[in-house]
Image (cartoon, rainbow, N blue to C red):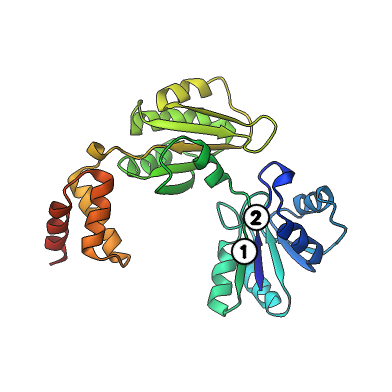
Amino acid sequence: MIILAATPIGNLGDASRRLVDALEAATVIAAEDTRTAQRLLAALGVANRPRLIALHDHNEKQKAAELVELARDEDLLVLSDAGMPTVSDPGYALVAAAAEAGVPVTALPGPSAVVTALAVSGLPTDRFAFEGFAPRKPGERRAALQALAREPRTMVFFEAPSRVAATLSEMAEVFGADRRAAVSRELTKLHEETVRGPLAELAAWADAGVRGEVVIVVAGARAEEVAFPDAVTQVLELVRAGTRLKDAAEEVSAHTGHSRRELYQAALAVKR
């Protein structure tokens, strides 16, 4: 089978017993960076020296079929540099190919920068959307953020330290200067820091420079910021995903403040 193994995002003490056992037993490991995998083995005191295969963004599509066939005969342990493989890291193409080929896939749960930053943000955690890295080019970044301006769920972004100030400034312009947010850097490490406040204040704070691995968490749009047609669209999207119309209208109503009955009637009219 294929085993996706979450690795520490900073503090080695977060390595689970299951991860260490899996590393000790592994005969072959597909790693985002084989050098990082070797350092992890040494840091955790694992004497095992399995075969290491590079699996990264540039070769995953070409390697997936080969690795799936390998996993038919022996367990394949998959590691990214930090956190859970497939989450803004290599692994998705491999898992998709394995699912298509009927090869079992399991995971060893563990550290995740996404949920860690969300948990300490002080923002709503009942519903959230992970958006990965914002586009690098300013025009593409603004377009992506504009598409999220009325997203009612809390949003989680990864960002490179060199682009944090620009991204926060753009968010303040698109989402609103007063939209609440939190910036976490170096999570679980010695210099861990989380700064919370309105986007405009965070953008000003970041102008001085930000170091380390960064996660940005932004509050979703308030109910009055979600236009009724957008709320109806959310209802229809839930229905297309398999939710009953009545339940979809109730869910969207709870997060946008729009009338459940009006949402139901409007969505029903579109469906007809």
User: What amino acid does circle 1 point to?
Assistant: Ala
What residue appears at the point 38 percent right and 40 percent down from the top-left corner? 145
- What residue did someone put label 2 on? 6
Q: Residues within 10 Å of mark 2 (few under 14, many from 20)?
A: many
Residue 6 vs residue 49: left or right? left
Residue 42 vs residue 247: left or right? right
Residue 20 seen in this snapshot: yes
Position of residue 271 measured from the top left corner of the image (x, y, whole percent):
16, 65
Check contact, mark 1 vs mark 2: CB within 8 A: yes
Number of labels in the image equals 2
Residue 71 vs residue 24: left or right? left
Position of residue 256 measured from the top left corner of the image (x, y, whole percent):
25, 44
N-terminal label among 1 and 2:
2
> Does residue 40 lie above or below 225 as drawn?
below
- What residue did someone put label 1 on? 107
Residue 134 seen in this snapshot: no
Quarter of the figure that contains the C terminus = bottom left
What residue appears at the point 20 percent right and 53 percent down from the top-left corner? 232
User: What amino acid does circle 2 point to?
Assistant: Ala
Residue 76 vs residue 240: left or right? right
| SS type, badge 1 | strand
| SS type, badge 2 | loop
Position of residue 120 measured from the top left corner of the image (x, y, whole percent):
52, 37
> Does residue 244 lie above or below 193 as drawn?
below
Q: Residues within 10 Å of mark 1 (few under 14, many from 20)?
A: some
